[in-house]
Amino acid sequence: MSDDLARMDATAQAELVESGDATPVELLEAALERAAQVNPEINAIIHDLADEAREQAAADVPDGPFKGVPFLLKDLGAAYAGQPLHMGMRLLKEADFRAPVDTFLAERFRAAGLITFGKTNTPELGILPTSEPEAYGPSKNPWDTTRTPGGSSGGSAAAVAAGIVPMAHANDGGGSIRIPASNCGLVGLKPTRQRITEGPLVGDNFSGLTCELVVSRSVRDTARILDAVEGSAPGDPYVAPAPLRPYVEELTDESTGLRIGTMTQPAVASDVDPECVAAVEVAARILSDLGHEVDDSSPLDLMPQGDEEAGMQIQDSFLTRWGAGQAALISQMEMLIGREITPDDVEPLTWALTEIGRDRTSGRYLADVALHHGVSRLIAGWYAGGHDLLLTPTMAEVAPKLGSFDQHGDNPMDAFHRAFPSGAFTALFNITGQPAISLPLHWTEEGVPVGAQLVAPFGREDLLLRVAAQVERAAPWADRIPPVFAGAVAGDAA
């Protein structure tokens, strides 16, 4: 049964439990078997929580939409009290640091019936679009183990792509859901800012750049888990607009005639790999065949033509907010561990960003946030002018080779700048807070997945999921599996 389960999405596995054809214990043991088979090769899971998971599976599992489905938490963000929380840091690993409380999102995952049996690899503090922390070593892409599965949710994406679990927790501060989804041939939805609470310890994380959800193998799983976990909690600093109806109701909506613009050059300076443009072309053809109107308009039309300075301002102002977030996080960790953190405690890039965050003034921070608000109004104005969605490549490059993000040279910031092609199309929508989804619609001749991204107006995940479900029916990807896949035999991989 384990081989069959490896190909099932979370909804299908939950249906087995509901029908009595499988028990939560059986699903868990099969997932543990798959993990034992492939995790040594891809290094996706770094914390073993099997004993706790077995106790949960054998007890009274909550009767949620994913009752009994095995699950993994990323080792950054959502957490359960008492479990390891190292965030890719050697410092926290050596201290055997444990989460002090259940986060609200973790509680909602449990209430949905998910059974967490491990935690996945992530770069230190989620900084880079690759998962190669010094603390735990690199995660590898199941489609090509010489390449990164992405970051910062790379361990989760590798585990899902390899068939260990049908979906896994992920979060996104500059593309960390969508980049791994693109690299690993998965669905990755970044929700609207504050669609999902980050409490109780976090409110306005990184001044609103970050959000939480999952990477998955199907649009229906993404819609169902969003229904299960969306919403605010007491004390949240602000909330996203309430959904118009349950997101699962969008899955069968066959509406047509949406107006969709395309953008194949990013707002920031970056070359774009032709394979990434090809992913947009594939998506545009599918959308046109579905009855939507696709044109070449984009928010860049409202910006000064050829204004490279504007792109540089967006990049540098993002660095202000990201550096401020790292500096604040390091200060919070100092309080938790009871001592000052030094450069020897962290990776070189982490310290470089922390210093930037400490050096840039509060006035500059507010000015850069104001710049981002202006960009957000400009893009919102483009949608108000008549477009429903924007289509872009998810990334400006195909999944990079492992070792591409070297931070141990003369300038650790070289690794951060090397990340621009990975986040060229994603980070903009962390700035604006809009929902965006990456869909696996293209593969290179070498068999590496390349995602296409759809972006909706603020609060309109319904549009994204409706159209994504239409695209999935028109060009299904469920049968495509990577060379490293749990239970796969020779010739199975697409």
Image (cartoon, rainbow, N blue to C red):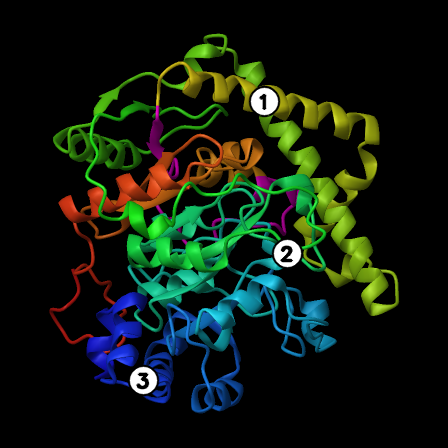
Question: In the rendered image, which residue does mark 2 sit on?
Answer: 125
Residue 484 is left or right of residue 76, and the answer is: left
Question: In the rendered image, which residue does mark 3 sit on?
Answer: 30
Percent position of residue 136, x then y: 56, 70
Residue, x 33% and y 55% (percent of image)?
184
- SS of the residue at dot 3? helix
Instruction: Residue type at mark 1: give it.
Output: Met
Instruction: Residue type at mark 3: give it.
Output: Ala
Question: In the rendered image, which residue does mark 1 sit on?
Answer: 312
Query: Toward the viewer: 450 or 336?
Result: 336
Percent position of residue 42, x then y: 39, 70
Residue 219 is left or right of residue 400, and the answer is: left
In the rendered view of the protein, which quadrant contains the N terminus? bottom left
Instruction: Residue type at mark 2: give it.
Output: Leu
Instruction: Determine the CA span between mark 1 and mark 2.
Output: 24 Å
Check if mark 3's residue and mark 2's residue have beta carbons within 8 Å.
no
Q: Residue furthest front?
A: 245
In the rendered view of the protein, which quadrant contains the C terminus? bottom left
Instruction: Determine the CA span between mark 1 and mark 3.
Output: 49 Å
Query: Toward the viewer: 127 or 472?
Result: 472
- SS of the residue at dot 2? helix
Count of marks placed on residues: 3
Tell me: residue 153, above or below residue 410: below
Tell me: residue 161, above or below residue 247: below
* Magenta-highlighted residues: 388-416
Residue 359 is left or right of residue 244, and the answer is: right
Residue, x 44% and y 73% (percent of image)?
114
Q: Alpha-carbon neighbours of circle 1 within 10 Å: few (<14), some, or many (≥20)?
A: some
- Marks 3, 2: nearer the viewer: 3
Q: Which mark sits nearer the N-terminus, 1 or 3?
A: 3
